[in-house]
Amino acid sequence: MTSSPVTSSGPPSAASFPYKLVATDLDGTLLRDDDTVSVRTREALAAVTAAGAAHIIVTGRGVPWTRHILDDLGYEGLAVCGQGAQLYHAGEHRLLTSVTLDRQLAGLALAKIEAETGPLALAASRDGLDGEVLIGPGYRMLDGELPAVFIDDPAEVWAAPLNKVYIQHPELDDDALARVARETVGSLVDVVMAGAGVVEILPLGLNKATGLSLAARRLGVTAADTIAFGDMPNDIPMFAWARRGVAMANAHEELKAVADEITTSNGDDGIAVVLERLLLG
């Protein structure tokens, strides 16, 4: 994605801002549907950082699927990636921490889910700064140009350390699959629905809130200092952790139900709408 020149006068400046940390999800929230960030949203984020707040991106994407976006934004701070599994320093292009999924436990969980649902299609995100995303037989990739490695043998998924496993069912929709999986193996692993066609198996207890809290401690801020923006059920823990949670108009109903506020959509500068209002005081 390419950066647009900043030509407008931008949002109003402010001597202070009521939060010290602005946490934004990426897909469906900060990014528009064409995977770009609008000039208006860029300017609003620049204004709040100029007023003393930090901006941190908190995404389900692993680092390899995130860093090109951060580079385009000129983003040099910390980013929480992989549903909280990875803490990445964008300015240094360095992975600071990473949590991996116990592959034996994940395999057991998968077998238990399939005993309830029948065969599933699999994908997986390998650990590391350059970790590959493996796509198994029958797994439907979303449109886009994100790098992936297609495999013929599902056993290859388990050959190296992983951050998470993606599952799809030929008939069950995302909500139904996530619900069945959570009810079946919720004591072994965490299961989240992170977007259309994206149901994930994660280490138990890992979520965006755990990753964000780790990043916040490094920045010297707390949950009470934080406003968070998101659009999917995987953002629910982040909303529960932050002082204020703002759902996009395009958000999943489960997230809207727990949000403190609903703003306009990701395509209509929903983040900027809220930040500009807060900057005005």
Image: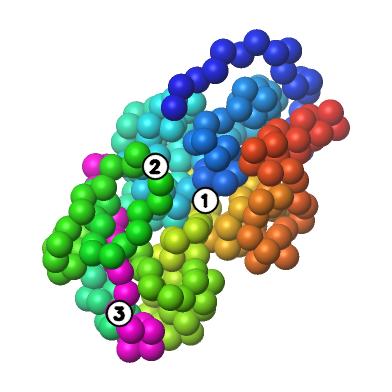
Whether residue 126 appears in magenta in the rendering, the answer is: yes
Residue at image location 76% in from the left, 56% down from the top: 260
Whether tag 1 and tag 2 are in contact, CB under 8 A, the answer is no
Q: Could you tell me how far apart the alpha carbons at marks 3 and 2 are, in whole angstroms?
A: 26 Å
Check the image and report above or below for 173 versus 148: below
Q: Amino acid at mark 1?
A: Leu
Residue 185 % position (x, y): 40, 82
Mark 2 or mark 3, which is nearer the start of the sequence? 3
Check the image and report above or below for 146 versus 138: above
Q: Nearer the viewer, residue 50 or 35?
A: 35
Residue 269 left/right relative to 172: right
User: What element does badge 3 sit on?
Assistant: loop
The residue at which mark 2 appears reads as: 144
Q: What segment is highlighted magenta in the picture?
A: 112-131
Mark 1 or mark 3, which is nearer the start of the sequence? 3
The residue at which mark 3 appears reads as: 119
Q: Amino acid at mark 2?
A: Gly
Residue 155 left/right relative to 255: left
Q: Which mark is residue 212?
A: 1
Residue 239 left/right relative to 128: right
Check the image and report above or below for 40 versus 221: above
